[in-house]
Image (cartoon, helix red, strand yellow):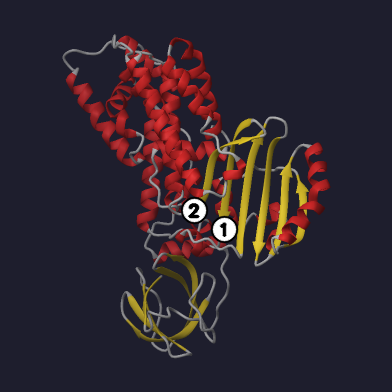
Amino acid sequence: MRIDSVNNPVLGIKTQGQDRKIEEGDIIRGKIIDISKENMIIKTSIGQTITASFNNNLDLYLGQTVELFINNIFGDQVFAELRDGNNAKPLNLNEKIVKILNEMDIPVKQDITNLAKILFKYDMPINKEVIEKIIGLQSSIKDLTGNITPEKIISLLFLADKANDTPADMLNKMILLNQNNIKEAYMNKPMYLNSLNNDASATDKILSVLKDLSIPLNGNMNNLVSKAASIFEGLGTGDIKKILFLISNDMDVTPKNLLALANNIKNDVKIGDMLNQLLEKVEAIETNSEEFSQIKNDIKKLFIIPEKLQDSSYIEDKIKDIVMLSKRIEEGLHRNSFHDIEFNKLLNGIKDKLDFIKAVNENNNYFHMPLLLNHQRSTLDIYIINDKQNQKQKKSNNDNATVLISLDLNHIGHIESIITIQRKNVSLVFRTDDNNIKDLINSKLISLNHLLKEKGYVLIASTVTNIDEKFSLNTISDIQRQEKLKDFHLDLRV
């Protein structure tokens, strides 16, 4: 059931006896004072009238006492579960989902029910539009990755320049149209292509098709091959959890975003690693070029030093430098007729990584930056988590926030910290699998407490634990839903 309006839109819906806006989990009680086939008006005990609409016939009557259990608030839409106020009995999750689907006039099938449960878990609206969109995306990804044919590869090469930024459902339609055009064009002059090895990588499959067609690998074709391979790789990671993360953050489900999110979750292919790989490739060819000798030195300067982490303009300039330097390298490779698919793939990957981080930050506070620490070039990840409202609006709340920090270094390995701040109270959890590092951290906690006191903070709890699952963008969603706080440490609840 959807709530369409209230008689005080400024204050919004209020619960009985409480002067505040409605929240998920609240219950509104009242009597039905008007009812039609698809709408009813309820008057609460505090005199507020609420108009609600529904898509199926309900056995309701004037004067009936009902309860509206607010189960979903998404943007300006409020959805509620109708209960009989005279005999209200809590429903289990399956019953809730079935009731919501019935009220939305959505078929109650096993696959739809399972999807609705996941949507419920992710605090996303359960309606026809959302369900059809997700099912369509899943079907398109399956079509695109299920059977990679020569025609599909040729179609993708035609679209490779823009396909990485194209939503999967739209991309599937475009490739299907191209495949039909290719088959039609070659009906009288068929292409003689060898069958593709299913176990081969996407790059090898693409190269095999180009070889059969006698298409040479010049600079532009190398670039297209690397883009097409990344597209197949990204689509291959498209499971339901990633799709929902992107949709819930107002991001398109594109091959580029799927691959970047998969790398983030795996704690893999970080910007510092990519720049280090770029440095190795440049060092391999610098002896033949003064231009690339200078580029090598400029890559080393892209890593941020800890002393500058609070200087936002400095960090922004470094990110811009990464973009400009990538363009310089691409232009230099073209001028020197240097063709390397892996080089092109790396440069495209850096650009895609930066685009993804920018898109994520439309609704989150996430920093992913190359770091120079103790003469080691690494990557620093920082996730700042506020309450849902501030998170969506990207408002920083320094009095009530959780900060997740992740770092990889050669001599200590992977280390993470969780910092929870509530007013001036601070709770810390350090996570590492290295016992020596654990001992080192424990030995420094007293000094850390003194430093926090000097800044006006009080350390109320600190713990050093093992790493069960590395931080990722999924961690933000989990903590916001309050489902995994217990997996970190109870002190996070302060």
- The image shows residue 93 at horizontal and vertical percentages of 56, 62
Q: Which residue is mark 2?
A: 364
Q: Is residue 368 left or right of residue 108?
A: right
Percent x, y of residue 482: 61, 59
Looking at the image, residue 35 lies above or below residue 256:
below
Q: Position of residue 283 (x, y in %)?
A: 51, 17
- N-terminal-most mark, 1 or 2: 2
Residue in the picture at 42% in, 50% down: 247
Q: Mark 1: which secondary structure?
A: helix
Q: Are marks 1 and 2 in contact (CB under 8 Å)?
A: no
Give residue 307's quadrant in the image.
top right
Q: Determine if residue 232 is in view.
A: no
Nearer to me, 272 or 230? 272
Q: Amino acid at mark 1?
A: Gln
Q: Nearer the viewer, mark 1 or mark 2?
A: 2
Assess disc 1: are there few (<14), some (14-19) or many (≥20) residues with their C-alpha within 10 Å of its C-alpha. some
